Image (tube, helix red, strand yellow):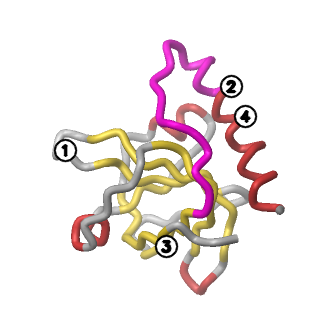
Amino acid sequence: MKTITTITGKVIHGSGYGKQLGFPTANIDRRQYIQNGLKLKFGIYAGFAVLPKGKKHPAGIVIGPRDEKKLPKLEAHILNFTGNLYGKKIALELHTYVRNFHTYKTIHALREQIKKDVAKIIKILKT
């Protein structure tokens, strides 16, 4: 499976919204994104989170939307992972574009879509 790009960064605190939804995410700082002038299509990607010591976990990676600094959020729901990554450097390997970023009218609709995304990501990464 070919890598679209890899973004590295330190895990920072986000809004906690993913955790509230039942799908916690690791948000990473955007220094490398800015330095490399990356302009990735906003949306959901299937890929891997490479954690400290090189351990790789499948991940649903979100690029976007833009925040108050006009920069896209970079975050990953790391499958089969529990632990604290705050302050640690990780890499997000983007492999397959899954779908466009979309705003949902209800939390229930968003949760259902995330469940579908996770199932699709697992299937993509197994092939």
Mark 1 lies on residue: 70
Q: Name the residue at 47% across, 72% down.
A: 6
The mark that comes first in sequence, 3 or 1, is: 1
- Image quarter (top left, top right, bottom left or bottom right) of the N terminus: bottom right
Of mark 3 and mark 4, the one earlier in the sequence is: 3
Residue 91 position within the rendered picture, expressed as x and y whole percent measured from the top left:
49, 73
Q: Which residue lies at the image location 57% right of the left edge and 39% below the top edge?
A: 99
In the picture of the structure, the residue carrying the numbered disc 3 is 91
Left or right of 112 on screen, residue 51: left
Label 4 sits on residue: 116
Q: Which mark is residue 55?
A: none
Q: Report x, y in % for residue 14.
A: 37, 47
What separation in Å lies between label 4 and label 2 (alpha carbons)? 6 Å
Q: Are marks 4 and 2 in contact (CB under 8 Å)?
A: yes
Residue 124 visible in image = yes
Q: Is residue 103 above or below residue 78?
A: above
Residue 14 against residue 20 in the figure, above or below: below
User: Which amino acid type is shown beneath numbered disc 2?
Assistant: Glu
| Residue 77 shows in this picture | no
Q: What residue lies at 45% left-to-right and 24% top-to-bottom?
A: 103
What type is the residue that disc 1 sits on? Lys
**What residue range appears in magenta?**
95-112
Depth check, front residue: 85 or 78: 78
Which residue extends farthest left? Answer: 69
Nearer to us: label 1 or label 2: 1
Dot 3 or dot 2, earlier in sequence: 3
Q: Please name the residue that numbered disc 2 is placed on.
A: 112
Q: Are marks 1 and 4 in contact (CB under 8 Å)?
A: no
